[in-house]
Amino acid sequence: MSLPEEIQDEKIRIENALWGLFISDALSMPAHWYYRLDYLKKDFGLIDGYYDAPHPHPESFMVGNGYHPNIEKAEELGRSYDILHEHIRFYDTSYNHLNIRTAERAGEHANAMPVLNERYHYHHGLKAGENTLGANLVRVLMRSVNAKGSYDPDSFLEEFVAYMTSGINSDPYSEIYIRAWFENYSKGISPELCAEEQRSVWSIGSHGGIIRPLVLSILSNEPFKGIGEAILHQQLTHRSENISSALSVLVPLLHALIKGHNPQETIAKYAKRVRLIEIRGEELSRTYREHKGPGNIPKAKMWKIHTEYSNNYLKVDETLEKYSDEEIIGKLFSTACYPEHGLPLLLCLLQRNNAEFKASVLANANAGGDNVHRGMILGLLAGATANEIPDELKSGLIAYDELQNEIKGFVDLITAVQ
């Protein structure tokens, strides 16, 4: 029995949205966390396709990131704690000696970094068209849903733990939320309560917490329930007010685009619901540098920096008329990992490029900063507006064959319950 034409069109848009996520992730990966666009242009010129992760990364401060599980308690409980495996050499942990030393403070945020030749790319070793850990955890979610025939939080958490402790992850970069989650897990905390709070660790409020919940919201077929499902899933790994606020805008926006609403009008409409943060762009970067890195800013002040909003809302078309791309990217809105900056930025990038798929995802890749996680969100939205996704971008993904099956199974499940 064939699907009604309206449902068939929505099915195509959902498929394209999911392909958009994985394509945007892989396109952005080589230039992830390039804050200075002159560095990005020097190493890549203009990103127009898939590239290997280069070495060295001029602004990388992955080396020395901390991961300190309670090994004694984890072993007593029979809980696996090694989530780093072959990538452990890049981290300061409670079960390995870090041989690479930080030597100076540099970069956009004045964080501690090694000498240039030891500034390993966050995704060191990944090849052109290969997806990052963030995208592969979306696959973990989709496989969990496909296997159960519905979403089950406990099943996802089991699959999440199994994936992270299996040693099959090829991406060195584990976001701080993953490391904090497994530190709590190693202490014996119940899995559904292991998520760290943004109030304790400011970077918990990051783009990475939006991606899987936004994908999961599509299962609900309508935004009201979708927001609830998204925030429920978010709380498993990110206890963050900023992420929940972003989802309250992004879920209905994505659903409207899947329904076929006019992209430019819809983006402008939902952008007006985005309240702008008080400290933006260059001022945020300057504040970080003045304190010699964000880790030196007192927690109360850090909370205020990331949660004190102005009385202004995003008028995306007016912003694009008033500012050039050079002014918007980094100066007006920070390209860092925070959704209070990244949400208005990605909406501007989409609108500037008329939500045309390839132009939008490449604009995001070439904007640098947290282009990977911001880009997966943008890729979902841009893909949902596309009639088709270029075949060469899909087939250029290393996991193309597996993704075909996983995306098809997920989308078939969605349309089956409509």
Image (tube, helix red, strand yellow):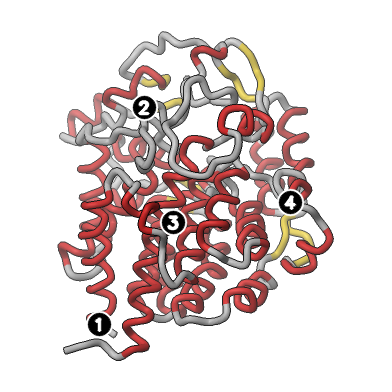
Residue located at (22% from left, 35% from top): 168
Q: Nearer the viewer, mark 2 or mark 1?
A: 2
- Tell me if label 2 and label 1 are in contact, CB under 8 Å: no
Mark 3 and mark 1 lie on one chain; the one further toward the N terminus is: 3
Q: Identity of the amino acid at label 2?
A: Gly
Residue 276 in the figure: left or right of residue 210: right
Disc 2 residue crowd, few under 14, some 14–19, many 20+, Cα 10 Å: some
- Between discs 2 and 1, the one toward the N terminus: 2
Secondary structure of the residue carrying numbered label 3: helix
Given residues 216 and 309, the one toward you in this image is: 216
Quarter of image, res 17: bottom left
Give how far apart the Cα atoms at labels 3 and 1 are.
23 Å
Task: Determine the CA span between mark 2 and mark 4.
Answer: 31 Å
Whole-percent x, y for residue 275 in the image? 70, 64
**Location of mark 3 (residue):** 211
Question: Which of the 4 quarters of the picture holds residue 102?
Answer: top right
- Give x and y (percent) for residue 360: 57, 57
Crowding at label 1, few (<14), some or many (≥20) Cα neighbours within 10 Å?
few
| Alpha carbon distance from label 4 to label 3 | 25 Å
In the rendering, which numbered label is found on residue 125? 2
Which-is-in-front pick, marks 1 and 4? 4
Which label sits on residue 325? 4
Quadrant (top left, top right, bottom left, bottom right) of the N terminus: bottom left
